[in-house]
Image (cartoon, grey):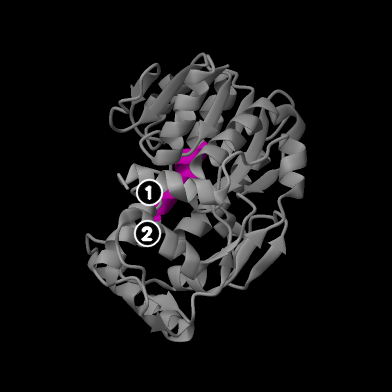
């Protein structure tokens, strides 16, 4: 394949680009800063710049789109510009350049309205019910990408859930840092069951989606390890890997949701530079079950996770030098 990977500055995008390159594909990345990835070519630019996007999609046959604004707070128009309009530009330029396969990397949050998801399949994206600017705009982006699915342009949406791995600064390092600072509470008793995905398994699923796009096109698939654990255990295992104490302070989820709504407004209005201690979206994610039936995903993609979660946590600890 001649593959374009957007968003290779993040852990999942970086490892996906490396995996395509390792198996012999011709790989290009589009991002704002140099990737430092061996064996790939680079286009430096932004999804919000049509000229950069046009240069990135030239002469490729497959696009794997991971780039997004992923913060948990911030002005909504910034999310729209990158996640929605950036995806729209990428889809349009890819179709115009003759790209035949387009893998849209989305999120299970696009179909999470705040209630528990227990053994659910991959429900349709519903931006009108999603909570938070990230989930809303990712849902809109997924829908517009899938709407472009057509003969000769096979679009597949993949929703990896809570991707963990060494070197992750988006989730793992933030959990460790908050725990170290005493800012990582358990909501209620931390007993909500959640799915997670070790990074190598998520990468394999994205490669499978690209390979089987003609079979899987027009559909969305949630990807997880299929090993739900409690929030308390996931926090504890990440903290153990990082060498910090696991959280023990408990906060009622109802109070966290109310406080999170207020804090989110303050952070957005004040344009404060750091991440808020809590948002309503985060409170919902930490206090409600969300784990998924993986049978359809594995059957259609002909994929299964090869790294069990316990092994993934061992590799995470090794990444911290432990």
Which residue lies at the image location 37% right of the left edge and 59% below the top edge? Answer: 240
Identify the residue at horizontal 32%, vertical 75% (top origin). 263
Is residue 272 found left or right of 251 in the rendered image? left
The residue pinned by badge 2 equals 240
318 part of magenta stretch:
no
Q: Is any part of residue 180 visible from this angle?
A: yes
Disc 1 element: helix
Q: Is residue 169 above or below residue 27?
A: below
| Picture mark count | 2
Rendering quarter of residue 67: top left
Sequence-wise first label, 1 or 2: 2
| Mark 1 vs 2: CB contact within 8 A | yes
Query: Residue 163: which numbered mark, if any?
Result: none
The magenta-colored residue range is 77-88
| Residue 217 left/right relative to 35 | right
| Residue at 47% in and 62% down | 234
Quadrant location, the N terminus: top right
Tell me residue 131's x, y (percent). 51, 66
Residue 317 image label = 1
Please identify the dominant SS of the magenta region.
helix
């Amino acid at each position: 394949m001649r593959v374009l990977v957007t968003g290779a500055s993040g852990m999942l995008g970086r490892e996906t680009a490396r995996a395509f390159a390792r198996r012999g594909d011709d790989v290009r990345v589009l991002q704002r800063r140099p990737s430092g990835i061996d064996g790939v070519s680079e286009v430096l630019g932004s999804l919000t710049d049509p000229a950069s996007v046009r240069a990135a999609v030239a002469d490729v046959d497959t696009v794997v789109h991971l780039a997004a604004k992923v913060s948990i707070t911030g002005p909504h128009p910034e999310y729209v510009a990158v996640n929605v309009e950036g995806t729209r530009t990428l889809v349009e330029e890819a179709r115009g350049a003759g790209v035949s396969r387009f893998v849209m990397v989305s999120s299970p949050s696009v179909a999470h309205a705040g209630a528990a998801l227990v053994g659910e399949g991959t429900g349709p994206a519903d931006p009108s019910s999603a909570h938070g600017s990230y989930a809303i705009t990712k849902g809109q982006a997924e829908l517009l990408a899938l709407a472009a699915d057509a003969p000769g342009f096979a679009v597949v949406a993949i929703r990896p859930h809570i991707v963990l791995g060494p070197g992750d600064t988006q989730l793992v390092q933030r959990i460790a840092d908050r725990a170290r600072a005493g800012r990582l509470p358990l909501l209620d008793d931390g007993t909500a069951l959640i799915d997670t995905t070790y990074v190598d398994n998520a990468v394999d699923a994205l490669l499978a989606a690209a390979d089987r796009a003609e079979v899987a096109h027009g559909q969305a698939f949630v990807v997880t390890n299929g090993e739900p654990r409690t929030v308390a255990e996931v926090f504890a295992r990440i903290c153990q890997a990082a060498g910090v104490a696991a959280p023990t302070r408990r906060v009622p989820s109802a109070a966290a949701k109310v406080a999170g709504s207020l804090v989110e407004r303050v952070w957005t209005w004040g344009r404060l530079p750091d991440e808020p201690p809590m948002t309503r979206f985060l409170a919902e994610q930490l206090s409600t079950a969300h784990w998924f039936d993986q049978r359809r995903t594995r059957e259609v993609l002909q994929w299964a996770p090869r790294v069990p979660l316990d092994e993934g946590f061992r590799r995470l600890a090794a990444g911290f030098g432990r």
